Structures are given as C-alpha cells and as structure tokens.
Image (cartoon, rainbow, N blue to C red):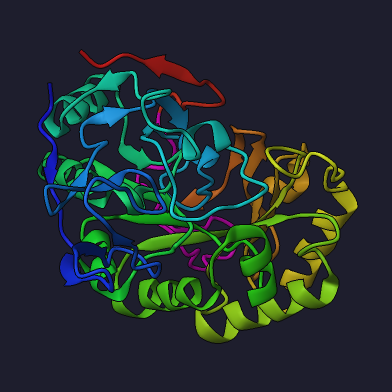
Amino acid sequence: MVARSQTRWWHTETGQDGRPKVVCTLCPRECHIPEGSRGFCFVRANVGGRLELTTYGRSSGFCIDPIEKKPLNHFLPGTAVLSFGTAGCNLGCKFCQNWDISKSREMDTLAQQAGPDAIVDAAERSGCRSLAFTYNDPTIWAEYAIDIARAARPRGLRTVAVTAGYISPQARREFYAWMDAANVDLKGFSDVFYRKLCQGMLHPVLDCLKYLKHDTGIWFEITNLLIPGENDSPDETRRMCDWIRDNLGPEVPVHFTAFHPDFRMLDYPPTPPATLERARQIALEAGLHYAYVGNVYDRARESTYCPHCGQCLIERDWYEIGAYHLKGNRCAFCDTAVAGVFDPQGLPDRPWGAKRRPLVIL
C-alpha cells in the first residue's frame, strides 16, 4: 500500500456557519471544502481538517505509448513513453473523451497501485525515454506527479504533462519546475465556450500558456479540439492563432483535432476533415510555423515541414514515422533550426511506432 500524500496549496477558513473549511488553492476554483467532503475534482478531500489527495499512488492503468500520441510532434520523435493517470478532473467538459476516467468516483477505475520509484523502474526496464501524466489532468494529482518527476530526473527520464492548464499561479511554479514537456488543451477561445461547456474560465489557461513560454524552459505544444457549431468558426480559429503568434511566438506547434460524439454531447456530429484542414490553413496564414491535424487519417497534414524551405522533415502515418530529414534540430535540406527537443542521434534504431502496450507494475 502506498501512503497518501501530504498535500500542498491549501489553508483553512471559517465558513458562514462558523465551522472551519479547507480552501484548496491548487486551481482557480478555490474550492471551500467542509469536513468529510471533497472538492470539484472529487479527489482532494477534507479529512480531519486537512486536505488529502485520495488518489496518491493509485492509477487507472499504465500503458506504453508513442510520444506522438500525447500529442507531441517535436519532443523526442519515435520514442516510447510510459503513460498513466488517476481519476477525477477540475473541469467539467461536456465533451470529455476520457470521461470514464475523469468523471470516475475513483474506486471504479483505480485498480493499480505504485509508488514513484516503482514507476520509474518500470519505465527504465521498458526502454521508455519519458513518463506522461495523462488520461486525466495531472494538475489535480500534482503532488504525486512531482514526486514521480523527482525520482525520474536523476535517472535521465523526462516527464510530460498532458493538461488543460487550469492551475493557480502559486501551484504552477512548483508543478512545472519538474516537467520537461507539456501538451496544453486550449479547448476554445471564448469565455462563453469555457463557461458553457467546460464549467471553467479561459483566462487562467491563457495565463498558464504565457507562463510556460516566458518563465520556463519547458517544451510545449497546444491541442485544440474542434467541435462543430461550438468552437470551430474561422473567426475564432483566426483569433486564437493570432493570439498564439503574438503572445507565445510562431514556433509553438498547434494540433487541431477531431471531435467525436461522447459523454454529454452524443447528439453532435463528428468534426468534418475539411474543418481541420481549414483550421490548419488559417494557422499557417497567421504565421504559425507548425500546424497539424489529428484524430483523422491525414498523412500530409500530420507531417512536419521546414518553415523556411517547405521540405517534409518528419513524415507521419498515424504514429508511424517514415522519412526523417533532421540533423539534430536542423533541416537537412537548408539547415534552418527547427523548434523542439530532438535527439542529436536522430530517430531510435527501432522507433516505437503505433504500438500501445498495457503494463502492470508490481
């Protein structure tokens, strides 16, 4: 049995009823939690007047994935990543495509237990170059993720956060100090969208993105899931891309991914491929150097091109890598630097490819 974590980012206040409450300051919600109750994310609870992370050391499952599945196209291409998550979420997205995990009442899905050292040992034995905190948002289990990253870093393993970026300024400083890469899910580009479909706010996510760019050395990419009739208008895409260019720079990759009906939005149609193609074209016209489509088969628009000469540098067929024309981080044709984290030796001798292998950690 793995011990429960001593949590950070909370204090106590006296409620209007005169009883003390725990105030969780991990994310912008700042949940006021009475004794015996839980916050919005469900996994942070007031136990005896202290905030407890009830999922510390417990996982919904471990799996070895291609790093491109996170998606990260400019971070150690072709390598394997040990992926895992817990339960719960601090957003309430009606379109959640991992709802069985993110909306779980934890005991339904948390079947495996493992401490930080055991997870790092398993990643090393499996030949993984990195660990991904994913499936549900690692923000809500930040203490567990940090402890794993502390164990991983001295052993040369990188850590990746797949997140919605919904975290408070005080928590993000410590959390991202231990991350090497991130994929941030920018769900839409309006407050109306975030309030209506995510039960959240846009500005904390934009603040997090600016923090990653200007105050850390983390490599990060952005994912934008396009939902028909909700966040897929050309105007919204153009405003988002202009904001990314002006605030984060043109070298941050953006992945436009297809929605499929799920959770509480089963009556919506899937995203047409033409919508993704249009969004990618808007991004390129806005001056972004790297724009991709995802969740559909489109070899040409999943591949990486040199922003200077236009040659294909990394060819992708779903998660299989074909032609590879980088020398270190430079275009093999014109020597232009390509933004990202690339192995100086190029691809691994045996790229991981599209395999997805479940793993049991004992």
Tell me if residue 312 can be seen: yes
Q: Residue at (64%, 73%) from the top-left corner?
A: 288
Question: Where residue 14 sits: x, y (%)?
Answer: 19, 72
155 is higher (above) or lower (below) than 205:
above
Of 173 and 212, nearer the camera is 173
Question: Where residue 314 sits: x, y (%)?
Answer: 60, 46
Question: Magenta span has 333?
Answer: yes
Dividing the picture into quarters, in which one does residue 235 lie?
Answer: bottom right
* Left or right, 37 with reference to 147: right
* Left or right, 195 with reference to 234: left
Residue stretch in magenta: 328-348
Question: Where residue 233 sits: x, y (%)?
Answer: 84, 69
Question: Magenta span has 232?
Answer: no
Tell me if residue 287 can be seen: no
Q: Residue at (27%, 67%) from the top-left corner?
A: 25
Of 255 and 304, nearer the camera is 255
Of 60 and 248, nearer the camera is 60
Dividing the picture into quarters, in which one does residue 239 lie?
Answer: bottom right
